[in-house]
Amino acid sequence: MKVLVTGGAGFIGSTITSACLDAGIAPVVLDDLSTGRREFTAGRSAYIGDIADHHLLDRILDEHPDITATVHCAAKIVVPESVADPLGYYRCNVAKTVELVDHLQARGVDRFVFSSSASIYRPDDDLTVDEDSALAPSSPYARTKAMVEQVLADAAVAHPLRVVSLRYFNPIGADPQLRTGLQSPNPSHALGRLLHAYESGAAFTITGTSWATRDGTGLRDYIHVWDLARAHVATLQRFDQVVPGERGSSVVNLGTGRGTTVRELVAAFEAVVGERLDVVEADPRPGDVIGCYTRSDRAARLLGWRTELSEADGVRDALAWAQRRPEVLGV
């Protein structure tokens, strides 16, 4: 099997390509390197360019006529940035995806795995969700994910196209073999900011302490990025069972089923490193939400997949990658 992975030089996309290689699936990477790293394409067929470039897509499909599926990870993903630049986010995440999907299905590549997000949910009162929970995306970033899901579902009714939208919760960690990891030394998510605080000696800022959670801080379902990558492999391997026939779509949550607050994540991090961090508090950032975790077993039923790695594993792998990152990336 051969699969096109857009955004395959980024943190999640590169981990997915590693998992594909380990499973005997040949990845072909398409990335514009706006945030991805060329180093993460080593040993993989890779093309540098825009996902909406029809000429480049034709070249890729002409040179790899055995591509039978696409994993679409390419997107802008920073919530506060999306609030400041909504047009840029709608252009990149929505408009360019329309061009990508339109061209792929016209060329007969009818299996499409979309990297969606649990940020599109409106959590139930207990902060859990399943795939049928109400949607209420609260930032331009989240709205782009919800919009693309709707576009794909509509397209899969009208055209010979099959779609699985995988709704990610909160990825942490790194490839356990340390082939890839977070490319930025200053990431915006909680564990990345914890790592930066630990490495630099700066204070870690908890943004928002008045949420309706057990300790007032936001709650997340932290999933190891390697478990997330394995889920994509399982989706590709079982695609025809998940979405049988010539057209149709499905959505699947990818999470651990456990809710962890930011304060609890800090405590887990401190337990791994054996040190206390300097922690300060601040107001929520633009676009921040209370969070949620999955109560769904659909991934287990449809994909035969469950998480295997813990939050502590995620912290340890992230720390190990942080030590290796300068050697691989020079930053």
Image (spheres, rainbow, N blue to C red):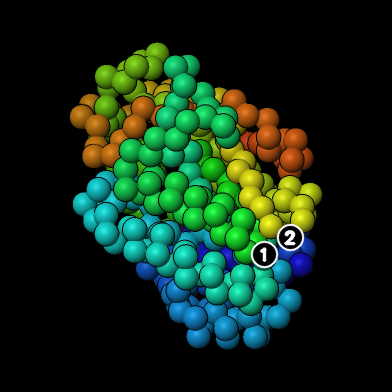
In this rendering, the answer to whether 236 lies above or below 197 is below
In this rendering, the answer to whether 235 lies above or below 30 is above
Of 205 and 322, nearer the camera is 205
Report the amino acid beneath label 1: Pro
User: Which mark sits nearer the N-terminus, 2 or 1?
Assistant: 1
Q: In which quarter of the image is the C terminus?
A: bottom left
Q: Is residue 254 left or right of residue 35?
A: right
The Cα–Cα distance between marks 2 and 1, rounded to whole angstroms, is: 6 Å
Disc marking residue 218: none
One can see residue 195 in this view: no
Q: What element carries label 1?
A: loop
Q: In this view, does 188 lie to the left or right of 117?
A: left
Image coords of residue 299 (percent x, y): 68, 38
Disc marking residue 160: 1
Q: Is mark 2 on a helix, strand or loop?
A: loop
Image coords of residue 63 (percent x, y): 65, 85
In this rendering, the answer to whether 287 lies above or below 51 is above
Image coords of residue 75 (percent x, y): 43, 59
Q: Which residue in the protein does label 2 denote?
A: 246
Report the amino acid beneath label 2: Glu
